[in-house]
Every structure is written in structure tokens, then in C-alpha cells.
Amino acid sequence: MSPATSSQSVAYRPDSRVGELPILVGIMAILIGLFGIFWIVVGVLLLLAGLGILVAPAFVAFSWVGSSVVVAGAITLIFGAILLAVATGLWDLETWALYLTGIVLAGIIGLLVLASSFGLGLVLAVVLLVYLVAVSPHFY
């Protein structure tokens, strides 16, 4: 066996779990993606309302704000696009999406602890963070 063949056989392991989408990561990706799409729609509606293209009764209450609606719409649109990118990264098992999701979850845990909110939200955030650490070998 030549050295090139032996190094290639070490790289491929049939029992490797890399690339297999864990079920909860898939569910998280779908939910984050749907949330991102929701925020993109809200951002577009706010932009249209702020520019005067779309006038709906719900936006009349914000008419005194003026250009702030445009800024809020742009920020909301960007936030939705980031969420959609993270959902796509989680679905494709990208490491950067895993790290970004872990950082956001750690931030949520920190905020909940600072707010003394020791309830279901904190438990869910901790469980999701531990789960992401446990399935990190699946990511590229």
C-alpha cells in the first residue's frame, strides 16, 4: 500500500457522522428560516409604509415618526436576511452558523439570567445550547 493510498483511507471513515443533519438542527433551521421570512415581510411592509407607497390603517399610528419607519424597516429587513442566512447555514451544517447560533443562545441565556427569568425560556435556551455542542461533530 502506497503512502498516498493509506492517507486517503484515513480521511474517509464510513462510520463518520459528519454531514448527517440531526433532526433538531433541521427543525431549528426551518423555524429560524420561517422567522427570517416573517421579518423580511415586515421589513418590506415598513419600508413601503415609510416611503408612502403602502398606507394601511395599522401604519397611520406611526405617521408622526416619519423617516424612523424607513430606518426601522431597513433594520428589520437586514435582521430577517441574517436570520434566513443562518437558517440556510444550519441546514447546510456550516460551522459559522453553529457558532453564530451558539453565541446568540449564550447571549439570550445571559439576558435571561440578568433579568432573573428562571423559567421555561431559560431551560429551553440551555437545552438548545447543550444540544448544539453535542451535535457539533456533524458540522463541517
Image: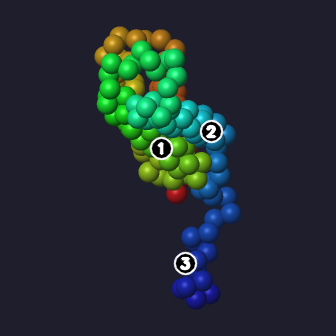
- Circle 2: residue type: Ile
Q: How is this picture coloured?
A: rainbow
Q: How crowded is mark 1: few (under 14 residues within 10 Å), some or many (20 or more)?
A: some
**Image point (39%, 19%), residue name:** 62
Q: Mark 3, mark 2: which one is toward the viewer?
A: 2
Residue receiving disc 2: 30
Can residue 127 be seen? Answer: yes
Disc 1 on helix, strand or loop?
A: helix
Disc 2 on helix, strand or loop?
A: helix
Question: From mark 1 to mark 2, how far is it between C-alphas?
Answer: 14 Å
- Circle 1: residue type: Ala
Residue 18 point in image, percent of width and height? 59, 56
Which one is in front, 118 or 13? 118
- Which dot marks residue 81? 1
Residue 101 point in image, percent of width and height? 45, 39
Q: Which numbered disc, 1 or 3, marks the residue that appears first in the sequence?
A: 3
Q: Residues within 10 Å of mark 3 (few under 14, many from 20)?
A: few
Which one is in front, 134 or 116? 116
Q: How crowded is mark 2: few (under 14 residues within 10 Å), some or many (20 or more)?
A: some
**Image point (60%, 35%), residue name:** 34
- Which dot marks residue 45? none
Q: Can you say which quadrant of the picture contains the N terminus?
A: bottom right
- Which dot marks residue 7? 3
**Image point (58%, 77%), residue name:** 8
- Circle 3: residue type: Ser
- In the figure, 134 relative to 106: above or below? below
Can residue 106 be seen? Answer: no
Question: From mark 3 to mark 2, how far is it between C-alphas?
Answer: 38 Å
Q: In which quarter of the image is residue 14?
A: bottom right
Q: Mark 1, mark 2: which one is toward the viewer?
A: 1
Residue 103 point in image, percent of width and height? 38, 38
Q: Which numbered disc, 1 or 2, marks the residue that appears first in the sequence?
A: 2
